[in-house]
Amino acid sequence: MKPITAIALSGGVDSLVAASLLKAQGHEVIGVHFFTGYETGAALPAPAAARESAETLAADLSAQLALPVEIVDCTREFKRCVVDYFTRSYAAGQTPNPCLACNPAIKFGVLLQYARERGASHLATGHYARVLADGSGGFKLLKGLDPLKEQSYFLARLTSEQLAQACFPLGAMTKNDVLRLARVNGLVPIRGGESQDVCFIREGSYAGFLAAQRGFSSRPGDIVDTRGKVLGTHRGLHRFTLGQRRGINCPAPEPFYVVRIERRRNRLVVGTKSDLFTGSCRVEAINWIAPPPLATLRAHTRVRYRHRGAAATLTPLDAGSAAVAFDTPQSAVTPGQGAVFYADEEVLGGGWIADPAPVA
């Protein structure tokens, strides 16, 4: 009997092609499509409408791929693990990264568990990343080969156990390869465009979405420069993130950028572009895929998805946190975002940025 591989299908071209590749390689494949309740674009979940949309989408995917596609209701878990986390982070003056929370909790948490209950040995997704057995029973996470598309950053919080059950058919492909295969096989994405960083905010602004969440509150406060001089008034700290230029609305000879968010004092601190640079930061709640370092470690560190990464020295503080000292100061190292550590192509681990230190 062939082993069963489940494939998470979003309706986009990447997961469609990944499923087609698995079938061509002789896998017995079942499709799973999950809905979160936020597909309607509303700030609050609408499970009934989301299910109806999911059923239509699953039927289309099943017809295109000639395989069964099952629906998984993730509304409760998505609200708790992703949306509530997103809301708490902004309430604390941080900038969250929902994908880093979603992948271990939802795709390789809820969805993987469902797949295993259906008899699948692995869950595949359309991520551009690679998994490699390390020869001693563990598994490594590697960058995808397409430098413009690779998505290992978003998977850095998967455990070795989750990686052992993960499959990424597109890891050695480029986006152009995928688009070509889609055309050759007549695969038509139901959801066009690239996946969004914040998939559950489809309409309106972050500020409007947050304002609708239960228990979330904000109030106006001072906008100050780096010396503490009051320049104006903000309408809520949740409207800003480090490095932001738009929306400050304080006239000056040169543009102001957000350089710090002081939640306790409800102050937005702004400065010039040079004030954004940071020489070091602390990273907390690190998920180590490689063995945790016992001494200082050299690593390439990415502080956001589109960051090219920077050479740095990591000093372990305890099993789950480390001090990161960059060789060259980096701009907009943002509390709440993910810091992901690399050794060449291998992802060593990743955690949450806290307390960036300004350049003296």
Image: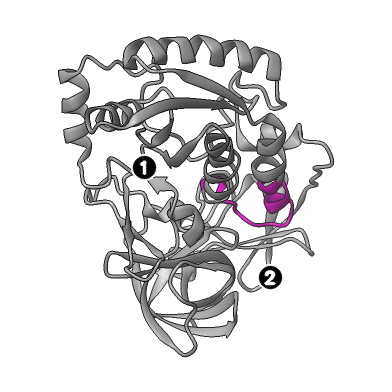
Alpha carbon distance from label 2 to label 1: 45 Å
Q: What residue is shown at x 30% (from left), y 15% (from top)? A: 188
Q: Earlier in the sequence, mark 2 or mark 1?
A: 1
Q: Main secondary structure of the magenta part?
A: helix
Name the element at disc 1. Answer: loop
Depicted 159 relative to depicted 53: above or below? below
Depicted 205 relative to depicted 346: above or below? above
Q: What residue is shown at x 32% (from left), y 66% (from top)? A: 346
Q: What residue is shown at x 27% (from left), y 26% (from top)? A: 20
Residue type at tag 2: Gly
Depicted 278 relative to depicted 107: above or below? below
Residue 345 image-quadrant placement: bottom left
Q: Which residue is mark 2?
A: 228
Q: Is residue 249 magenta?
A: no
Name the element at disc 2. Answer: loop
Colouring: one colour
Q: Is residue 90 magenta?
A: yes
Residue type at tag 1: His
Q: Position of residue 68 (x, y in %)?
A: 44, 17
Residue 81 image-quadrant placement: top right
Q: Say whether residue 253 is visible.
A: yes
Residue 335 image-quadrant placement: bottom right
The tally of labels here is: 2
Question: Neighbour class for label 1 at 10 Å: few (<14), some, many (≥20)?
Answer: many
- Residue reaching furthest right? 215
Left or right: 254, with 74 as reference point: left
Q: Which residue is mark 1?
A: 127
Q: Which residues are magenta?
A: 85-99
Mark in front: 2 vs 1: 1
